[in-house]
Amino acid sequence: MARRRDLWTGAGPGANPFALPRGPLGWGAGWFLARANRTQNAEVAGFLRAFGGGDVLEVGHGPGILVELLARQCDSTVTGVDPSAEMVRMARRRNAGAVRAGRVRLRRASAQDTGCADESVDLVVTVNTVAMWPRLDGGLTEFHRVLRPGGRAVVTWHRTPERFALTPDELDTIEVAVRKRFGTVERHQLPSSVVFSATR
């Protein structure tokens, strides 16, 4: 069973190399994330097909695996933001063709301040970042702000491996926060991920 951590206290990334990959270890962290999260990114991309097209924002895109998958499966613009300059560089290299074509836009920004205009996207998704946000309500408020009416917010976290999983109480905290911000929430159990989704 996962042990409870001190989450959403307002503290910065601290010593967690995956919360803000930078410096000499940043590339290594990105390489690890690309491998470790590949299955979950593919799983989430499949889940998102049900919501159709529209402009997409991925928050905390890391090395750009999900951005790449979404750019392949939708005809609209995919925007990615990440607080790590190293992850933005890695994602730009991975998606160089789509960036040149104007179908993918990547920049440095955070869950709490994406830099997107009000009501500018149809889908906001984040994979395995929510437990690293300084404030849970800050990220969800930003998701609500940038979504168009009828747009969908999708927040996922590791279900496996168990050492990365959140406790039942922590998952309940996310569910309550999403419901408070959006009015409703659905929780889905995928093979590798727990998914919370809500409509604006």
Image (cartoon, helix red, strand yellow):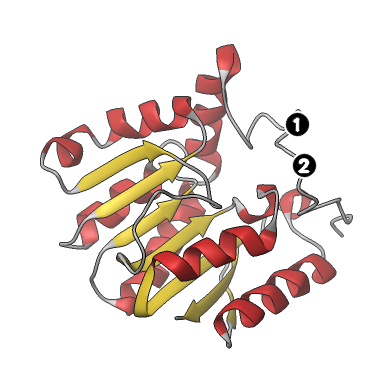
- The residue that label 1 is drawn on is 14
Question: Front-most of 65 and 120?
Answer: 120
Residue 13: where, in percent of width, then height? Answer: 70, 36
* Residue 111 visible in the displayed image: yes
Please name the residue shown 58% across and 87% down the image: 183
Residue designated by label 2: 11
Residue type at tag 2: Ala
Above or below, 58 relative to 171:
above
Q: Nearer the viewer, residue 12 or 186?
A: 12
Q: Would you identify the image quadrant in which residue 17 lies?
A: top right
Q: CA distance from mark 2 to mark 1?
A: 8 Å
Residue at 41% in and 54% down = 58
Position in image of residue 160 (x %, y %): 67, 57
Say above or below: 52 vs 145.
below
Considering every residue shown, the one lying at the far bottom of the view is 184
User: Image height check: is 143 above or below 83?
Assistant: below
CB-based contact (under 8 Å), mark 2 and mark 1: yes
7 sits left or right of 82 in the view: right
* Residue type, numbered disc 1: Gly
**Residue 91 located left or right of residue 158:** left
Badge 2, how many Cα within 10 Å: few under 14, some, many 20+?
A: few
